[in-house]
Amino acid sequence: MIGVALGGCSEGVLNPKGPVAAAERTILFNSLGIMLAIVIPTILATLAVAFWFRASNRRATYLPDFEYSGRLELLVWSIPAMTVLLVGGVAWVGAHDLDPRKAISSTARPVPVQVVSLDWKWLFIYPEQGIASVNHLMVPVGAPISFELTSSTVMNSFFVPQLGSQIYTMSGMVTRLQLQADHAGTYPGLSTMFSGDGFSDMRFTVDAVESDDFARWVRGAHETGQALDSQTYAELAKPSQAVVPFTYRAVSADLFGGIVNTASAADDPSQRICSPSQRAEQ
């Protein structure tokens, strides 16, 4: 029965496949253990009091005039205070150790990936490899993945539960995230923030493979598909739902920066009300 109950956790945060997700699970279990240290005694004490002060127990002392007990107040307030301090300490230490921007210690060279959330799909750009993919992220096992993330439209949320660290994508801004897959496999990724009609299908697949297989995939991607430039990006950026994964054989070098800068200008009121010639004069 326990195996059946936990079967649904095989693709979630309780089954980590990378160092970040494993550390987050440790924090979760530590916090749970600390809270159970007060929850379980409280439940047992409630049952004990109800049993002892039952109507049929003539040995129970009835104290209708009881008002205050310093020792009882100390017990009632000290245990929750200690629980809050311990849970807060675990969260404080974990928040600094798992800073999304903090580099992961590894002998392997990090792989940079630029992420753009679109309506309603995910674009992954590999600047060093010169390729891009939609709704499919391929990463080498054991290598840190250095993400730069932005949004082409509304605010969104990037999350791979088995690798860890959900993080937001915002138009005109760049957020950074470090992840790593320690085991080969296929892991689900998703958007965790409602962003419109196609939100439910805004999912992607992460394939963690050996370095040779990753290099082979990169070579294959260079041989098929279109080149991703400003024109093809404009077509890709149009709202669409349940997009089947595909790749681009080449990517314009400045595409990601252009997406960020374009969104920044669109969000700037002074840029919206001025003509291009007026902006040039400024």
Image (tube, rainbow, N blue to C red):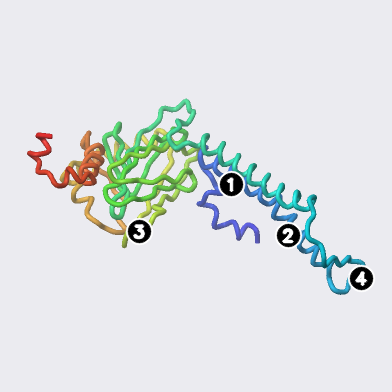
Q: Residue furthest top?
A: 107
Residue occupied by mark 4? 58
What residue is disc 3 on? 199
Q: State how far apart marks 1 and 4 are (Cα).
A: 45 Å
Q: Which mark is residue 43?
A: 2
Q: Give SS at disc 3.
A: helix
Q: Find residue 172 and report its horizontal and vertical position in percent.
A: 27, 42
Which quadrant of the rendered structure holds the N terminus? Answer: bottom right
* Of 49 and 31, the residue lying toward us: 49
Three-letter amino acid code of the residue under disc 3: Phe
The residue located at (40%, 52%) in the rendering is 190
- Mark 4 Cα within 10 Å, few/some/many (few <14, many 20+)? few
Mark 1 nearby-residue class (10 Å; few <14, some 14–19, many ≥20): some
- Relative to residue 206, is residue 147 depicted above or below? above
State which tag comes first along the sequence, 2 or 4.
Answer: 2
Q: Residue furthest right?
A: 59
Amino acid of disc 4:
Arg
Sequence-first tag of 2 and 1: 1
Q: Do the CB atoms of the residues marked 3 and 1 lie less than 8 Å apart?
A: no
At which x and y percent is residue 231? 15, 45
- Image-based side of 248 in relation to 138, left or right: left
Q: Kindly report the distance in space between the C-alpha atoms of the residues bearing marks 2 and 1.
A: 22 Å
The quadrant in which residue 197 appears is bottom left
What amino acid type should be assigned to the residue bearing mark 2? Ile
* SS for dot 4: loop
State how far apart marks 3 and 2 are (Cα): 41 Å
Q: Residue at x 84, y 71 (%)?
A: 54
Residue type at tag 1? Leu
Taking the view exactly as shown, the residue that stands out farthest to the bottom is 56
Classify the position of the C terminus by image quarter.
top left
Residue at mark 1: 28
